[in-house]
Image (cartoon, coloured by chain):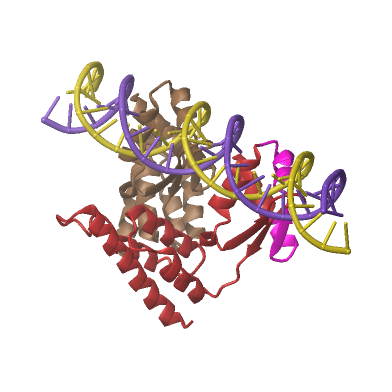
Chain colours: A brown, B red, C yellow, D purple
Amino acid sequence: MRLSDSIESFIKTLLAEDSSEVELKRNELAEYFGCAPSQINYVLATRFSPDHGYVTESRRGGGGYIRIVRVVQSGSQRLLYLVNERIGDSLSEEECIRILSQLKEQGLISAQEAPVMASAVSAKALAVPIPEALKDAMRARMMKSMLTTIAARNGV
Amino acid sequence: MRLSDSIESFIKTLLAEDSSEVELKRNELAEYFGCAPSQINYVLATRFSPDHGYVTESRRGGGGYIRIVRVVQSGSQRLLYLVNERIGDSLSEEECIRILSQLKEQGLISAQEAPVMASAVSAKALAVPIPEALKDAMRARMMKSMLTTIAARNGV
DNA sequence: ATACTCTAATGGTCAAAGAAAGTCAGAAAA
DNA sequence: TTTTCTGACTTTCTTTGACCATTAGAGTAT
């Protein structure tokens, strides 16, 4: 795996845990990954730009830091973020359910839609004799497809 | 946490308790924080300047002291202070941004206005072949003009 | 008592050192 | 060729220390 990608996913893990904001030390992070500090700037520039839905602030000097904030998005933007960033190639039924219930809570999908979508990716619906791994891959694709449709319906 | 930040929040705690005014001994405070006395001056200069809404008076010699007073101003008064006292004949883009972000934080301009104003004075907006010094002069005039407009809209 | 001087106790200034982060051109890798 | 990575150099913010300025009060001379 490319170094930049490792750093990117490391930061995204932090962002997933710690709400939508992380603060980190450029030098520490560089040391952790055994790379040049400026590598961190490269990752920020290529993966955490406003185009990617993030803003960064930083401070130099003693006690300096870099703060990365995931930008507040419209509902559709958030759906597309999930499609493009959060959902990878594979999702378990449990993960699907968790995502759907979050979305329902946030009002991004309706109380009618949520259970429909959940049933689409349920083990029951996918009860055909293929490996589990394939089912999870299908679930990811189904979720992306459904969410993209909803985002488009609501306009970006 | 940065030493300066610790001292800043210590003083702000005192200010919150004791009305809007504190009196302290530079040397005692420095001793308490185990730092050079001049560090206190640094904190005053960078966090308790008139720009930040404070004025300080002090006295040397036996029984000397430093008094910090939080200035109460209406929003419009503060804007006019900026126009008449703080903003001179010239402002860099960075200074503009700093001022605007402070004003946004203080609720004197809205989160919608701030980026609009920032973009007006941005290097991108002013990308014409004239000397930098002239652009900075324009920025100062633009900022004064915009802030005066907002102050007038909100009433003094 | 008054005025003057000396001194200890304060606070102020500024330049230099230290501690991060940013930039950018070019090397390396894909 | 494009993307990734590095290193030298730059900029910004913090902290310190040496030296300067001011003040109250004690001591002293008139």
Relative to A152, does residue B76 appear above or below in the rendering?
A: below
Q: Position of residue A59 (x, y in %)?
A: 46, 42
Whether residue A94 appears in this view of the structure is: no
Q: Quadrant of residue A48?
A: top left
Left/right of residue A44 with respect to residue B80 in the rendered view: left
Residue nearer the viewer, A12 or B40: B40
Q: Quadrant of the N terminus of chain B?
A: top right
Relative to A126, does residue B98 appear above or below in the rendering?
A: below
Left/right of residue B151 with respect to residue D15 in the rendered view: left
Magenta segment range? B13-35
Relative to B40, does residue C24 appear above or below in the rendering?
A: above
Q: Quadrant of residue B55?
A: bottom right
The residue shown at (33%, 73%) is B145
Q: Quadrant of residue A153?
A: bottom left
- Count all numbered tags in the image, as a single digit: 0
The residue shown at (32%, 53%) is A148
The residue shown at (52%, 65%) is B106
Whether residue B44 appears in this view of the structure is: yes
Q: Position of residue B138 (x, y in %)?
A: 27, 64
Residue nearer the viewer, B24 or B95: B24
Residue nearer the viewer, B27 or C22: B27
The residue shown at (40%, 50%) is A120
Q: Is residue A76 magenta?
A: no
Q: Position of residue B79 (x, y in %)?
A: 46, 71
